[in-house]
């Protein structure tokens, strides 16, 4: 029997090339090796977007469409919507007893995020507690493997701590610890070269961008500001065009030659941008075409079926959890 | 249409005379004036008893039996078990977003309890967040009236804050604020005269105590240590026997006469304890008899029916809540 793997995204916006490199391409591969669950984490996204719920709920379908367009196959991958599985909330409430405030305060991921968001004294309790909710996400589906970036490793440690404490206190084996698979691919930088590609920074190329938008963004890309004349030698390091060529050009040797040419001078920015444009258009074309294959109704249907299937597992886990605690009376 | 009233107890032990004076007698009366919901709050009790779940789960039936024995009528009062209504957990998770950590830290009730329990850095997150869960309890049943002691008033304020914030952010009217009805009756002191009657202090007379146990406890009661000979004048203030006579003797004039007699001397402790014993045995006899009327199966059935009925309301409220937030996709 294949092991279960759980991944997912907060539906805060459409997915972009950074998501493809960081996780989507892995999922397309992993769905053949594992029993894959992909969760659209709307409840988690609401913990820091609760005042703007439409942003989240509208993006649930966009994200699902992005999944399908890159080749996540609903026949073998279970795509589910977190909010439609209330058993996760139920499990979260029991897990909250097993984690102290002090432990949550020391969670490095949450600590960093709280600083980034400038919450000060006004940290929403839901946001503060989201690692507990995440532990419920993972364990309710009995996921054994969770692919994460290295910044998310403390989350998995927190999950396994809860699992061990639960099983010990309630003398149970109904929950299982999970293993981290570190995502090898590094994050993709944004077109401005300043930070990783992200919707909020407006420096990302979306999987759903039109051909014109893609071209426009490529021609905005940060290259080497000292590379003024075509004949000048140019820098490859920190040059976003080459970062993207490294990530998306199918022929590594050709990229190597281009880099050498650029460094010795004689290769203009327009030329390399045109090359990248060809590469990305070719990469995005089938994604764009696949996106058109699905009607809204079909996507709703896929989400409903996936959620239904996932919920069956969640219901079974919660039955065992309730039995272990003893909150079963009828 | 009658207004809805919600009350309840944490099932941490059998109920005693203190519960009768503090809440049960009110409920027996209020069930005719209101549509009364009485919740056995096992999930809340677990927030500070999660390591000893059997203590909670076993007492669910004891508490239900206590309710029925004092005359809470399952035909007109809905008795429900909190854990069996998972919609409460679901609502709690959404409410957690609407409350900041700072606000929870400032909750006077929780502050006091944290000090009493000596939690220091090891406050379970579930315990810390229980006011949010309590807001979910109240609002999911659309309760309009909540009878509480004055120490619980901050909980109701917290609930109404959440309601107003939810309705404002999600532009909704699906939740309603609730009103406090302060319980007039003061708390009953324990037989040791030191603190209020409580199971954990071992100074309470339980509704389910046998006639012998009741008598034994009455003869242990703290009276006036300076009242040595029958002929000595005795103190009525702080004398537990008189506190209980005040609470349970059907004839206030007779108690007044007894007090006067005791104060001028000539009335012995044994005499007043025998009088109290007669009063309490007469009070407890019908309760003890009613307790025997119910089989375990009948009680389970009453709890199941009550929970089922309550859950219907909870499901309806959660549908409106999900719609207001927008987490409704199929």
Image (cartoon, coloured by chain):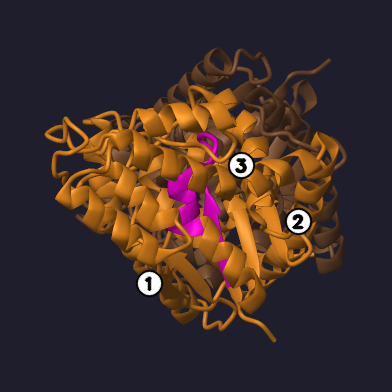
Chain colours: A brown, B orange
Q: Are marks 3 and 1 on the same chain?
A: yes
- Which residue, given by chain and number where applicable, does mark 2 sit on? B306
Residue A76 percent coordinates (x, y): 84, 35
User: Could you say which quadrant of the image residue A144 lies in?
Assistant: top right
Q: Position of residue B48 (x, y in %)?
A: 42, 34
Q: Residues within 10 Å of mark 3 (few under 14, many from 20)?
A: many
Give the mark toward the camera: 2 or 3: 3
User: Circle 3 sits in a helix, a strand or a loop, which is it?
Assistant: helix
Check the residue under mark 2 and report the chain it is in.
B
For this rendering, which residue is in front, A274 or A191?
A191
Q: Which mark is residue B42?
A: none
User: Mark 1 Cα within 10 Å, few/some/many (few <14, many 20+)?
Assistant: some
Label 3 resides on the chain identified as B
Q: Find the magenta span and give its range.
A: B5-23
| Residue drawn 40% across the image and 56% down it | B247
Q: Give residue A207's quadrant in the image.
A: bottom right
First in residue order: circle 2 vs circle 3: 3
Horizontal and vertical percent position of residue B136: 53, 60
Closer to the camera, B317 or B58? B58
Q: Is residue B16 magenta?
A: yes
Residue ID for mark 1:
B161
Which residue is found at the position 80% from the left and 63% from the top? A292
Residue B25 in the image: x percent, y percent? 53, 60
Kindly state the secondary structure of the residue where label 2 is placed: helix
Residue B111 lies in the magenta stretch:
no
Q: How many marks?
A: 3
User: Mark 1 falls within which chain?
Assistant: B
Which residue corresponds to the image point at 57% horizontal and 71% vertical from the top-left? Answer: B143
Q: Quadrant of the C terminus of chain B?
A: bottom right
Q: Which residue is mark 3?
A: B63
């Amino acid at each position: 029997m294949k092991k279960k793997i759980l991944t997912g995204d907060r539906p805060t916006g459409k997915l972009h090339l950074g998501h493809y490199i960081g996780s989507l391409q892995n999922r397309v591969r992993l769905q053949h090796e594992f029993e894959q669950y992909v969760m659209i984490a709307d409840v988690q996204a609401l913990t820091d977007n609760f005042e703007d719920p439409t942003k989240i709920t509208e993006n649930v379908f966009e994200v699902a469409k992005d999944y399908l367009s890159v080749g996540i196959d609903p026949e073998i991958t279970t795509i589910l919507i977190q909010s439609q599985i209330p058993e996760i909330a139920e499990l979260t409430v029991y897990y909250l007893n097993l984690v102290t405030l002090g432990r949550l305060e020391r969670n490095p991921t949450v600590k960093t995020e709280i600083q980034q968001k400038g919450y000060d004294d006004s940290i929403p309790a839901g946001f503060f507690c989201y690692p507990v909710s995440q532990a419920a996400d993972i364990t309710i589906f009995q996921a054994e493997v969770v692919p994460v970036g290295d910044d998310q490793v403390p989350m998995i440690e927190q999950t396994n701590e809860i699992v061990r404490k639960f099983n010990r206190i309630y003398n149970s084996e109904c929950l299982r610890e999970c293993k981290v698979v570190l995502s090898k691919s590094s994050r993709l930088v944004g077109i401005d070269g300043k930070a990783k590609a992200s919707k909020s920074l407006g420096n990302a190329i979306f999987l759903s961008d039109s051909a014109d938008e893609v071209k426009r963004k490529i021609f905005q890309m940060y290259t080497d500001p000292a590379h003024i004349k075509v004949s000048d030698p140019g820098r490859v390091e920190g040059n976003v065009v080459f970062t993207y060529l490294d990530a998306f050009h199918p022929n590594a040797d050709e990229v190597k030659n281009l880099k050498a040419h650029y460094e010795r001078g004689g290769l203009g920015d327009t030329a390399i941008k045109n090359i990248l444009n060809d590469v990305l258009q070719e990469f995005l074309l089938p994604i764009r075409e696949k996106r058109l294959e699905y009607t809204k109704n079909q996507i709703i249907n896929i989400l409903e079926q996936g959620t239904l299937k996932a919920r069956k597992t969640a219901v079974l886990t919660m039955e065992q959890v309730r039995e272990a605690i003893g909150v079963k009376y009828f």
